[in-house]
Image: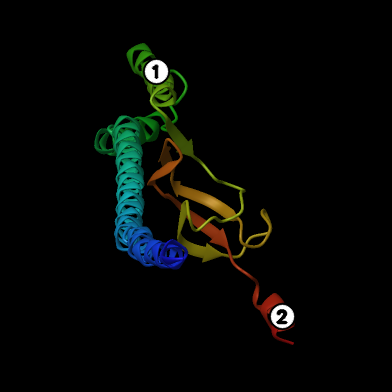
Amino acid sequence: MSEMKEAPVTGQEGKENATPAVAASAGHDLEPAPEIKQLQAELEQARAEAAESLDRYLRAKAETENSRKRAEADVVAAHKYALERFASEIVIVRDSLELARMVELPEGSNPAVQKMHEGLDLTLKLMDRAFQKFGVTLLDPKGQKFDPERHQAISMVDSEEVPLNHVVNVVQKGYLLNDRLLRPAMVVVRRTPAADKGTGQA
């Protein structure tokens, strides 16, 4: 009978002995939680730093590309407009040659003077070819509509030869250098007659 009494005690002791093991196991399962949180925080920080580094890289790349394009544009402009100062001076020489060529020679003029006249014609043709080769374009806007971007009006006159606000006469021809204004054409423009002005106001 004593043996039958001892059996329940042994079972209870087994249960009591198992309780610390279960508690230890439960405690062991909760230990990694702080480490996971730390790892997650470090991961988020690494992602933020990676995104910031990528943004800096993209900005630097864009700035480098812009600098390259600006440098290329500067080189193109330097080649395109390097002759601007020289062209500004040489067009004055052409003006003088053209004025000399406009002098009419009387009949029976000295053959040497006639040869000089022919030489002026040839020189002007050669200059115009050189101008064309280097992008210098002559502006001779007689009869054209007045363009304030390319023409400079020095006076206005009444005229029936051209429509209103058109060039009646060119006092000095203008020039372009590769589509950029080198010198405006000095022009006389037809003004609006007084009668038309009165009609417009009415």
Residue lying at 31% horizontally and 52% vertically, measured from the top left: 46
SS category of the residue bearing label 2:
helix
Q: Earlier in the sequence, mark 2 or mark 1?
A: 1
Q: In the shown orientation, is residue 169 left or right of residue 27?
A: right
Badge 1, how many Cα within 10 Å: few under 14, some, many 20+? few
| Image quadrant where residue 165 sits | bottom right
Q: In the shown orientation, is residue 144 left or right of residue 96?
A: right
Q: The C terminus is located in which quarter? A: bottom right
Q: What's the colour scheme?
A: rainbow
Q: Which residue is mark 1?
A: 126
Observer-nearest of 32 and 21: 21
Observer-nearest of 8 and 118: 8
The answer to whether residue 115 is above or below residue 29 is above
Observer-nearest of 180 and 100: 180
How far apart, in angstroms, are the residues tagged by discs 2 and 1? 49 Å
Image position, residue 17 (x, y; %):
34, 63
Badge 2, how many Cα within 10 Å: few under 14, some, many 20+? few
> In the image, what residue type sits under mark 2?
Gly
| Image quadrant where residue 146 sits | bottom right
Q: Which residue is mark 2?
A: 200
Q: Which mark is residue 78?
A: none
Q: In the shown orientation, is residue 90 left or right of residue 144?
A: left
Residue lying at 42% horizontally and 43% vertically, measured from the top left: 180
Residue lying at 36% horizontally and 58% vertically, measured from the top left: 25
Number of labelled discs?
Answer: 2
| Image quadrant where residue 44 sits | bottom left
The answer to whether residue 201 is above or below residue 71 is below
Pick out the residue farthest to the front: 1
> In the image, what residue type sits under mark 1?
Leu
SS category of the residue bearing label 1:
helix
Q: Say if mark 2 contacts mark 1, CB within 8 Å.
A: no
